[in-house]
Image: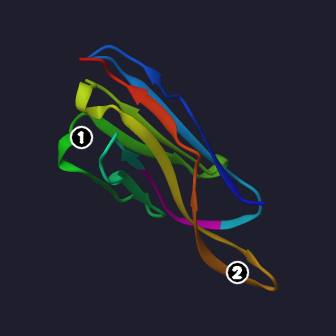
Amino acid sequence: QVQLVESGGGLVQPGGSLRLSCAASGIIFSINAMGWYRQANGKQRELVAAITSVGSTNYIDSVKGRFTISRDNAKNTVYLQMNSLKPEDTAVYFCYGDLVVRDGLRARSKDYWGQGTQVTVPS
């Protein structure tokens, strides 16, 4: 069974740092892309950062220069290094993966989500 398991959330003061990790486990043939979304109270889920299989990255404007997404292909793990955190970064952060997995006798791409991890930056 393929799953994404996140870790690293918590409470941090403004200006502080956190590193989120997301490990994909199970029978995975390859990873097309992985990323991080977040959802604050009363708001829609938004894409924060993503990284493709060849290492291309993109970020939402509000985190550029503060957050860095990276991946360890050998460990099927993606990281989100978050620096200079602000109260507006407070949200539940969800890991996302576009993974190539076994589907019967074939391989196909499927989307997976982690369970979410809370990041809180008090004002």
Q: What amino acid type is highlighted by mark number 1?
A: Val
Residue most toward the bottom?
105
1 or 74, nearer to the observer: 1
Queried whether the magenta region covers residue 58, the answer comes back as no
Q: Position of residue 85 (x, y in %)?
A: 28, 25
**Mark 2 vs mark 1: which is more N-terminal?**
1
The part of the image, by quadrant, that contains residue 3 is: bottom right
Q: Which residue is mark 1?
A: 63
Residue, x 36% and y 59% (percent of image)?
A: 56
Please name the amino acid that badge 2 sits on: Ala
Among all residues in the image, which is located at the extreme right? 105
Whether residue 35 can be seen here: yes
Query: Residue at coordinates 50% horizontally, 56% vertically from top-left?
Result: 96
Placement of the N terminus among the 4 image quadrants: bottom right
Q: Main secondary structure of the magenta part?
A: strand
Question: Residue 122's spot in the image, x, y percent?
Answer: 30, 18
Which stretch appears magenta?
A: 30-36
Residue at screen point 59% across, 76% down = 109
Residue under numbered circle 2? 107
Residue 86 in view, yes or no: no
